Amino acid sequence: MKFEFVDYSKLYYTKIARTLLPPKRSGKFIQVINHEMDKEYIVLSPKELSIYHANIVERFCMLQGESGGSYNSKRDFFEINDGALEVVGGGMWSIDDESKTVSFFGASQMYGKYNSDGLKMKLKNRAGIAGYEIKVEGV
């Protein structure tokens, strides 16, 4: 299965907030599988950009050109219309550029815990975190 690491931090800080990328940042992430493309994604979003994991799911679908979906009444869960996409789970992340560490932990209340199997190896040498120590809760 192919793997892609997506981080919305630069988008948020440099384009939306019009500021420098902070050396320490954190937020929520989702893990998505596109079954048709046989591809897995880890998608990070800064806490200032996404209140809920559902906001990340919606943005991911929109930026991937997918057919979209719909929110529940509380707007804390986004259901994807495209049956090829599956949200495996989610959690929280933090990156510290000074100590060169990236951490993945916790779980999404709405989508459940992400699958940590092999995650460290998949993330190793990815753009933006190459050479960083990767910490995955429970591994």
Image (cartoon, rainbow, N blue to C red):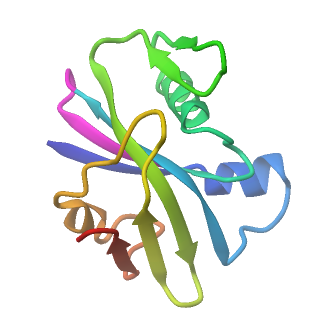
Q: Give the residue at x 65% y 13%.
A: 73
Chain part drawn in magenta:
35-43
Q: Give the residue at x 65% y 68%.
A: 25
Which image quadrant for residue 21?
bottom right
Q: Give the residue at x 32% y 22%.
A: 85
x, y percent for residue 51: 68, 42
Q: Give the residue at x 31% y 64%.
A: 123
x, y percent for residue 94: 54, 68
Quadrant of the rendering where the C terminus is positioned: bottom left
Q: Nearer the viewer, residue 128 or 49?
A: 49
Q: Identify whether 24 is placed above or below 108.
A: below
127 displayed left or right of 49: left
Q: Nearer the viewer, residue 70 or 73?
A: 73
Is 32 inside the magenta-drawn segment? no
74 displayed left or right of 16: left
Is 37 inside the magenta-drawn segment? yes
